[in-house]
Image (spheres, coloured by chain):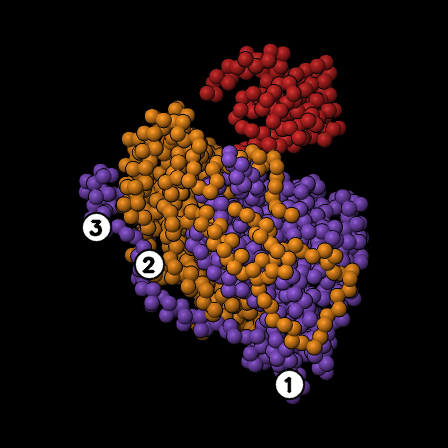
Chain colours: A red, B purple, C orange
Amino acid sequence: MVPEGHKYTKEHEWLRVEGEEAVVGITDYAQSELGDITFVELPEKGREVNRSESIATVESVKAASDVYSPVSGKVIEINGALADTPELINRSPYEEGWICRLSVAGAIEMENLMDAEAYENYLKELK
Amino acid sequence: MSYVPNTPRDIQVMLDAIGVKSGGIEELFKSISQELRAKSFDLPAGRSEFEVERYLRGLGKKNVTDLIYFLGGGFYDHYIPAAVDAIVSRSEFYTAYTPYQPEASQGTLQAIYEYQSCICRLTGMEVSNASLYDGGTALYEAVMMAIRITGRNKIIMDGAVSPIYRKMIRSYTGNLSVEFVETPLFHGSRMSYRDEIDRYLDDRTAAVILQNPNFFGTIDDHSDIAEKCREKGILVIESVYPIALGVLKSPREMGADIVTGEGQSLGIPLSFGGPYLGFMATKKEFVRKMPGRVVGATTDKKDRRGFVLTLQTREQHIRRSKATSNICTNEALCALRALVYMCLLGKEGIKKVARLCMDKAEYAKKILGEIKGVEVKKWPTFNEFIIKLPKDTSEVIGKLISKGIAAGFPLSRYYKGMDNYLLVAVTEKRTKVEITAFANALEDILWS
Amino acid sequence: MELIFEKSRPGRKGLTLPEKDVPAEAKLDPKYARKEDAELPCVSELDVVRHFTNLSNMNFGVDSNFYPLGSCTMKYNPKFTERIAAMEEFAALHPLQPQLIMGGMLTQGALEILYELENMLCEISGMDEFTCHPMAGAHGELTGVMLIAAYHKSKGKRRKYILIPDSGHGTNPASAAIAGYEVRSIRTDEAGVMDIGEIKKALNEDVAGVMLTCPNTLGIFNPRIKEIADLTHKAGGLMYYDGANLNAIMGKTRPGDLGFDIVHLNLHKTFATPHGGGGPGSGPVGVRQELVPFLPISRVVKRKDGTFALDYDRPLSIGYISPFYGNFAVMLKAYAYMLLLGRKGLTEVSENAVLNANYLKSRLKDHYDIPYSENCMHEFVISASRQAENGVHAIDIAKALIDRRIHPPTVYFPLNVKEAIMIEPTETESMETLDRFADIMIELAELAEKDPDAFKELPKTTAVGRLDEVKAAKDMNLCAL
């Protein structure tokens, strides 16, 4: 069961809203599809992103996937630990495997974000 | 001639197994309706090996190949050791496919790893790919790589870079929003506008393309240019001649970011245009932006060392439209030739062959310069140099050819206003007798 | 096995060079000279020969093993063609020679070969003119897409999209993207061909072209191909043929007759030039008359007196995509092959390629899932999904085949089939070889049911077992320094 407090996208990103900031990562489904992650290309701190823009790339032996930002905002923190230990995303996709933190610009557009139950149902459909 | 083993009996047995009741093999083509059938297939009848060989030998005789080559222009008549041919003739190497199943391809994979290593050692760079089609496409790929890395799209090309490569790069990028600025040729200083090149560098520039030796054979030290580029976040792309690297300052020593070049001089026959070998090497920090296949070392469960294609997620078969390039093939067999050549020559041999080229070119410069009316440019060169004749080269080249000498490349083919200039290349294969004969023949033609 | 560098010993050398015979010494200014030597290995010739001979023994090649790689056409490479390419009259020819004196008179033999080869390719594929400049299949695709762009530019409208089936080879979308187009993927329908309804919806005046292969990567010939061509042309787009699967149709149909405007062929597939472990190849491109002005520079022309020359005066050309005339030595091998086989021989190639594939399919159909059960052409795709339910995936079957000295077929391609295994036996394999392969595949299917764990440690007869690809990507040890 995916963590309750998060929001999810169809591209398997998760978003954890904390006041005016939000943390972004990829879901357990995404990491298991990718396989052992070998490299993460992180955004630069200070970068402005629009919703649905590619904010990071996650590479495994069989695929390189773009991570699309679920919200618009500015990158204020990146998870440097992923440089040496990209497998944190496989081991702990929702906690230690977080990718970056954004300061969110204005209200979050909720239409394309699913809550935990909706995302679970979406995953069932995919099978 | 046929390589199909199926006998009429085999065919019948197979058709029965498939369940074709009548109509023979044609039944298997029934999804191709009559109206879609070939409107013609008018090819000559097949022949025996003997007949085809006789025909092709006849065509071969219509080529003139016994000329003494002083012809270069980026492609050189170097000696190819017998062991190179022997090794690449092993069918386990040449009838193998791309090494996607590593356990069945360790021969190819280790060879590519060793090739990558030799290219790094020769150029001084940190990583190399498994090769690209030729020096021109390698240079184009370097341009695209620089654009990816910097996010800028302006490229400064030294006008003294090979005209063949400059034309290729422009053709490939024709549809893309890449801005090219070519510096003019400057006869004052080895043809390159290099002393004024910083006029062109700005914050929209992704990279500067330089060539050493340049197309006119002159050598340089680009460290000062690299320094200026570094200050502005501009990448330096150097296109180089591998044999020359036996003695010349390496691109790493000059501060290059991406190195490319043509590997034909490393044991690959001239073969009228190909196949050739494009090599590319760069700094470790840029490896993910580098196109082409790459082989990496790893281990198996029993801790035995093995090699695999790696970083494949950049490539077309996985990333598809987001790939770093569409390149699928490298030039594996040509890379193997180059590797074997570099191993046979070794650390000392590569220096010695470069030295021989330089010294013989020096001798050629000397005796050609002694001919009345012939001007040999005094610029520092490796094994290729320009001479200026007192008349149009087209009047002279044909006559030299009838004396069995391919005297050099007439620069008027690529450059306006250079009708009297000849680009002369001298390799280790040119003997004192041949060089002297060239000078004597030229003098004869000019003055008798 | 040791690296060649590990065998290096100071003072050893392979090749002895001649001594300097000129009374001159070039002075190399230290500022242009190398400070540190290039550390190339110091080894004897025997060291080198033994090293590479032993390396070669770790390879599978067509000459030693059955190699049914789908989409690659691993047919036998005739030794005769190697002899031809090595002929001094061709191998020693400098590419700048035609430009020395007017008219290319020094290279008439080579120019005639280029001319005749192009003509033969035209006849085989039903196109009007060919260029042999592209140095590989993917290079041919890029050239083809550049031609599409030039065509539309000349019509005044750039157009944005290229349509490609989801079963297409990865080079297709990559080439399109590199040339500046956006790719729209068209799904494959239940019959295994491009969904015609989707094509109709997707075609509009923004579509520059459709890139596909026929038969497709599933080995299925689309009977409505002409209709697709007509629809595309009506929308003002061009039809591009990826010639990877030409081995299925020679003498039966031709892309030109099916309505294609641009074609690329793979000489290293259909025309038996060796794959070389990953190149060199050659990817000539053929076009319809209307596109001829855009072909790359230069072109071989035949003069009224019967001699051959190179034409550089082509103002509408896409420019230079190759330093010279293409991979001549590769083209020469293909030309020799075509001369050997001739009309009947090339037709027999396709007939037997298709026969062999269908035979193999009939032997495997009860043991593996076959997503498209109609008769295939020269290749077919099976799925290991039944076996995957037991934990034996396509990759495991592949590794097991290696222990049986058979190079595995292509796995996990095309993308629209789960646990795909793509098999292309080619026409040069005998029925005995096909039967042996089928017997082994059936054995493996049975083993997958009885003892799935047996696959985990395979292959075990090769010099190395399954290699850690994750470690390779993370360590990034790409050269020995």
CB contact under 8 Å: marks 2 and 3:
no
Mark 3: few, some, or many residues within 10 Å (few <14, many ≥20)? few
Which quadrant of the structure image shows residue C221?
Answer: top left
Count of number-bearing discs: 3
Picture coordinates of residue C45 (x, y %)? 54, 61
Residue at coordinates 59% horizontally, 47% vertically from top-left? Answer: B129
Secondary structure, mark 3, is helix
Asked if marks 2 and 3 fall on the same chain, the answer is: no
Residue B370 shows in the view: yes
What amino acid is found at the position of numbered circle 2 in the picture? Leu
**Label 1 chain ID:** B
Picture coordinates of residue B96 (x, y %)? 44, 49
- Relative vertical location of residue C456 with respect to residue B134 in this rendering, above or below: above
CB contact under 8 Å: marks 1 and 3:
no
| Location of the C terminus of chain B (image quadrant) | bottom right
Disc number placed over residue C379 in the picture, else none:
none
Q: Which residue is mark 3?
A: B8
Which quadrant of the structure image shows residue C370?
Answer: top left
**Label 3 chain ID:** B
Residue at coordinates 61% horizontally, 35% vertically from top-left? Answer: C474
Residue at the far bottom: name it.
Answer: B448
Q: CA distance from mark 1 to mark 3?
A: 69 Å
What amino acid is found at the position of numbered circle 3 in the picture? Pro
Picture coordinates of residue A108 (x, y %)? 67, 17
What amino acid is found at the position of numbered circle 1 in the picture? Asp
Residue at coordinates 51% horizontally, 35% vertically from top-left? Answer: B302
- Relative vertical location of residue C295 with respect to residue C417 in this rendering, above or below: below
Secondary structure, mark 2, is helix
Disc number placed over residue B444 in the picture, else none:
1
Q: Which residue is mark 2?
A: C341
